[in-house]
Amino acid sequence: MVEATHAKAMELHDFLVARGISAWLCSAWEKDQARAQLNGTDLILSIGGDGTILRAAHVALHSTIPITGINLGRLGFMTELNADEVVEKLPDLLAGKGWIDERAMIDVEMQATGQASTQTLQALNDVVVARGAISRLVHIEVSLDGQVIGDYRADGVIVSTATGSTGYSLAAGGPILYPHSTDFLVVPVAAHLSPAYPLVLPSTAVIQLRITTVHQGVLSIDGHINLPLSDGNTVTIKHSPHTTRFQRIHPETAFYSSLEQKLKGKH
């Protein structure tokens, strides 16, 4: 897969340069190096799957540069083009055709027990507070605007955006939200003798997750930022002023037709 991704990236790089368009190459896993090249960039082509797009979204976080995903992965819910159609469709994108798909993000603030300082990060897909390597349930208290609304003994709790509603949240039994919804989903994972239903909360909500655990837990943001959690740690989640912008060429209704195909296991 790495070789196929690199080959496709080189093909598109040469395609663009041959048309007099400046282009640069960088791994989405090298965030600082990629961010250093953003100045003057008009479009990011993310080549791979949804995991690559999530990393590209973190690279482009403080800019308004749109992303177009080219699917070399398996499902590619966030990608726009298949590898075999990108050369045909790319000229239209470069000519400014298509539309901007703006997706909501969430701010994630972590605070250790007894400490005033916090760390704030952003997520496009989801935030998961869960057990760590030890296969033992954790206790997670969920509050909405300061009021406890759920008390879970579970493997974890997912807080998802609409974009993330087709990912881990869906696998855990959550619904699929309209892509431009700014609502949150709260979905427990393998809840034991606890409420197992998902909740849909408005974008104005301030959600707090407090973990009680004997063993180390984990805070996972978009599946690739993973931070340790200790007993009593709290994670606060709210609507972010940041968004992720996608440059699309297919019509808006294509989300639903392609979704049906992907849910059936067709690519």
Image (spheres, rainbow, N blue to C red):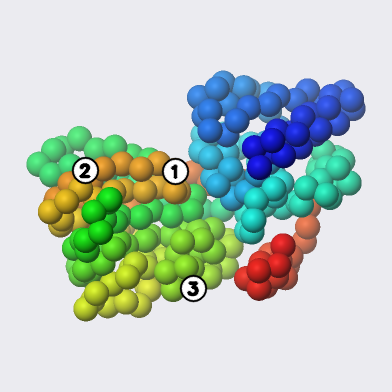
Residue linked to disc 1: 224
The residue lying at 89 percent from left, 46 percent from top is 88
Are the residues at dot 2 and dot 1 in contact (C-beta closer than 8 Å)? no
Residue carrying label 3:
175
Residue 252 visible in image: no
Where does the N terminus fall, quadrant-wise? top right
Instruction: Point out the frontmost of discs 2 and 1.
Output: 1
Label 2 vs 3, first from the N-terminus: 2
Q: Position of residue 124 (x, y in %)?
A: 49, 50
Q: Secondary structure at mark 2?
A: strand
How would you rate the neighbour count of disc 2 (Cα within 10 Å): few for under 14, some for 14-19, many for 20 or more? some
Q: Residue shown at 13%/44% (left/top)?
A: 113
Crowding near the residue tagged with mark 1, few <14, some 14–19, many ≥20 C-alpha atoms within 10 Å: few
Looking at the rendered structure, the kind of residue marked 1 is His
Q: Nearer the viewer, residue 107 or 227?
A: 227
Amino acid at circle 2: Gln
Residue 96 location (% of width, % of height): 81, 42
N-terminal label among 3 and 1: 3
Image spot of residue 36 (x, y percent): 56, 21
